[in-house]
Image (spheres, helix red, strand yellow):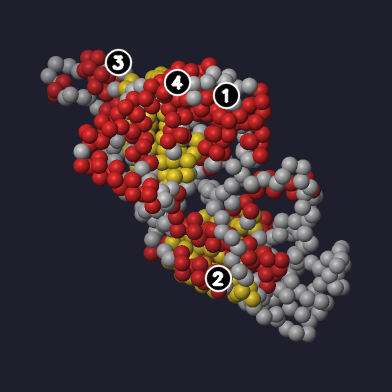
Amino acid sequence: MRHALELVAVSPGIGGVLLRGERGTAKSTIARSLAALLPAGSMRTLALGATEDRVLGGLDLEATLADGTPRLMPGLLAEADGGICYIDEVNLLDDHLVDLVLDAAASGLVRVEREGLSASRRAAFSLVGTMNPEEGALRPQLLDRFGLCVDVRGETDPAARVEVIRRRLAFDADPDAFIARWATGEEALAERLREARALVARVELPQPVNDLIVDLCRRAACAGHRADVVMAGAARAEAALDGRPVATAGDVEAVAELVLAHRRRAAPPPGAPPAPAPQDPDRPGEDAPGGRPDGPEPGPGRGRDREGRGPEHGPAPDRTAEIGEPFAVRELRLGADRVPRTGSGRRQETVSADGHGHYVTARPTGDAHHLALDATLRAAAPHQRDRRAGLGPGDPRLELALIVEPDDWRRAERTTQVGSAVILVVDASGSMGARGRMVASKGAVLSLLLDSYVRRDLVALVAFRGAGAEVLVPPTASVELAERQLRRMPVGGRTPLSSGLVAADGLAAALRRTNPGQRQIIIVVTDGRANVGLDGGVSRGAQDEALAVAARLAGNGCTWLVVDTEHPTGRRTRAAAGLAAALGVRRLSVEELRADELADLARTARRDSTTVETPTPLARS
């Protein structure tokens, strides 16, 4: 942690350092101690409730009123020039503010455009962000923009933990004596940092060092080129800290993990041949008894049907599949939420309906309700001289400190984070048990449940199989209960997709009646193929019925998402894509739910080794 902070102190253009770790590991303490060693000797803390005006700067109301000419006031980033800009719990800060801060940290400039004025100010600060991953993840796009990343953990060595206690007690007993004890070492470190900052711009990167940087980033499968550029800057800072004008391979190795920790992706070895396409789990292959590679699918009375039933032995017994390995779920882009809502949570940022929440901007309004006082005063300030000049003698408005007209009114727009009710609708029919598809699907569902827990959502679990659908878990805040039911959920029988959709809609309708401000998200985990109608009977028209039901439910006020469980390299029917189209929503495969970008590599490999199939007519009777 100290190493990363020293690098950023020497070369702020690296892009800052993100400290990820559990509570009570002195992340903020060490950041504050570093601030005293920097040229400005100061640290500015960006609070979670900060507005864009406070961060970037805005109209200086006092100066503008004094002379009638708009004047800009520096924001927090400009005030941090030469020091540290510290963001605690950066993962909870509004994304657009994080973006602005990262832009300024990388460029050393902050650009302000407010009230018709435009200006640029120097903002060469060292950025330090901290976060506890248990409280929510930082979007991958923003995570990548932090130059360095350190995973901070508490000491496990008993002797080191005892030393932490001793030093804390010594500081509490006599702070001045404690500071004096370490003053010499801090002065030496401050001088070392000053010399390194003066040298870093002149440090050279020989070609072999550049080649090593590129090789390390390629082997880590980093997206884009930011990792290469940051590693080069960090290697120069490392050499400058050591007082050398030329960076070496050792400098690169010293900083590599700090650069790659949050960017590394698992990737197949270079030159590895694509994996052979596995046999279609729903169709016997050449080596299966009686199998034919290109023959028609067996129907009733010929071999076993799709749900695992034989012609003479009746339905196969139900099975209970294991749960696959859970994974971090990507940020689900579920569409903008323009409906004013109330409540709490972390799933969705939405417009506040009750005037509470984070004040993000102000807009002109003709209604004096919920006015943004600061924005209204700023809008009125430049017109004061003209307005007073237009008033006649004795006009009572001459006594006012500020003349505000209705054209100056600005309404405060506030946003708040709200939770949602996430209804997971899982296909538990017999075909899902083939080739481990239910294992992978259960892993995806568990991952969605854990993601809902972090975002403080209610969760519900609906399974459909056999002749109908069943609500396994009514809406609850207990993810543990939902996980227990998921583990026990059997697999077998036919596919009543329509019943699953209708059951989910019924749950959502009940939730809307009890909590009108809540958002319902229905995630359907299925391959999209149906063979049982709403009446519970096997039907060749079940597929068309399911699509008709989906089209009717598309306007029910819920947010839908389809997770396609169809095997990626088997025979593609694209039935889930048809279901998503009927609902008017996105379709994601199980692998596309993952937060990392490995899925992109896998999809590219498949495109190179397979051909795209057109949708196949469905008849699951």
Visible residue check, residue 566: yes
Residue found at x 50% / y 43%: 139
Q: Which is more toward the observer, 587 or 596?
A: 596
The quadrant in which the N terminus is found is: top left
Q: Quadrant of residue 577?
A: bottom right
Residue found at x 68% / y 66%: 436
Q: Earlier in the sequence, mark 4 or mark 1?
A: 4
Name the residue that disc number 1 marks: 247
Q: Earlier in the sequence, mark 1 or mark 2?
A: 1
Mark-to-mark CA distance, 3 and 1: 51 Å
Figure check: 23 above or below 478:
above
Q: Amino acid at mark 3?
A: Thr
Name the residue that disc number 4 marks: 197
Q: Earlier in the sequence, mark 4 or mark 3?
A: 3
Nearest to the eye among marks 4 and 3: give it.
Answer: 4
Label 4 SS: helix
Q: Earlier in the sequence, mark 3 or mark 1?
A: 3
Residue found at x 56% / y 29%: 251
Q: Which is more toward the observer, 362 or 153?
A: 153
Name the residue that disc number 3 marks: 69
Q: Which is more toward the observer, 201 or 141?
A: 201
Task: Look at the numbered discs 1 and 2 and tell me whether their residues touch, using CB distance below 8 Å.
Answer: no
Q: Which mark is residue 487?
A: 2
